Image: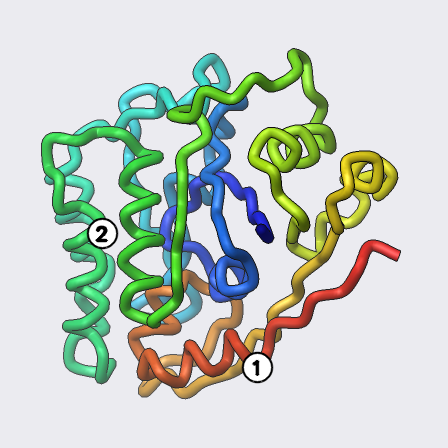
Amino acid sequence: MRLGIMQPYFFPYLGHFGLIASVDEWIVFDVTQYTPKSWMNRNRVLHPSQGWNYVTVPLANGSISIATHEARILDPPAARKSVLGKLSHYKRKARHYDAVVALVEEAFSTAEDDSLVRLNARGLRAVCAYLGLPFRARILSELALDLPPDLGPGGWAPAICAALGATSYVNPAGGRALFDPADFARIGVELLFAETELFPYKTGPFRFEPGLSILDVLMWNAPERVAAALRDGTRLTPSA
C-alpha cells in the first residue's frame, strides 16, 4: 500500500492532487500544533482587477495553542458566503464556474459542522470525485494508532507508515531534506518523492497567475484535462 500524508489544506494547488493521484491511501495529518496564516484556512484565486486574492475561512480559535484537529470555523454559513463572493467575478468569464461553485457548496454542505479539518477533507473528496481520482482518506486524529511520543517533523511519516502497514510512502519533492531514508529502510518502506508539472492555461480576460488554488485551475479547464495533466505530469523519484 502506497501512502500519502499531508496537513488538511483548503482547496490546495494542483500539485497536491498530483500527490493524491500517486497514492493508494491518504492520511489527513491533523494532530500537531496548528499553524496560523497557513494554507489550512486560506488559499489564492485570481483578483478581479489584477494579480491574486486570498479566499479565507475565518476561525474562532486559530492559534498555536491548539492542535490542528481542534480548529473551528467561526461561522460556517458566513465563510461559505464569503468564499463564493470571492469567486463571483469568475461567473461570466470562466466556462466551468458552476461546477466549481458546486464543489465549494459540497465542502460546506454540513452547515452545523464547524471543524476546519473535516471541511478541508470534504473539499479534497469533492475535487477528487469531480476529477475521477480514487480518494481513500482517513483523518489521523480519528485513528487509534499507537505512535511513539515526541516525534520530530521527520519522524511522523515512518511511524504512521509502520502503524498502517504501508509498503511505500510518497512526499512532495520539496520535502526531501526533512527525511532520513534510513528511517524508512529500517521498516521496509520505500521512500518516494512526487513532483507535478504545473501547466499554464488561458484565464480569459485575466492575467495568468501560477500556483493558485485548484479552484482557479478548475474554473478554466475541463476535469478531463486536469486529470490527464496529473497522470502525465506527476513524476515519482526514489530517495537515492
**Compared with residue 137, is residue 221 higher up or lower down, i.e. above or below?**
below
Q: Could you tell me which residue is drawn at 39 percent across and 73 percent down?
A: 217
**Compared with residue 80, is residue 95 higher up or lower down, i.e. above or below?**
below
- Labelled disc at residue 232: 1
- The reply to whether residue 23 is visible in this rendering is yes
Count of numbered labels shown in the rendering: 2
Which quadrant is the C terminus positioned in? bottom right
Q: Position of residue 149 (x, y in %)?
A: 65, 12
Horizontal arrangement in the rendering, residue 204 relative to residue 88 (left or right) = right
Q: Residue type at mark 2?
A: Val
Between residue 211 and residue 226, name the one nearer to us: 226
Between residue 170 and residue 211, name the one nearer to us: 170
Q: Could you tell me which residue is drawn at 83 percent across and 41 percent down?
A: 185
Residue with the mark numbered 2 = 83
User: Residue 219 occupies which quadrant of the picture?
Assistant: bottom left
Q: Could you tell me which residue is drawn at 72 percent across and 48 percent down?
A: 175
User: Residue 121 occupies which quadrant of the picture?
Assistant: top left
Question: Badge 1 local density, few (<14 within 10 Å), some, or many (20+)?
Answer: few
Q: Position of residue 195 (x, y in %)?
A: 66, 66
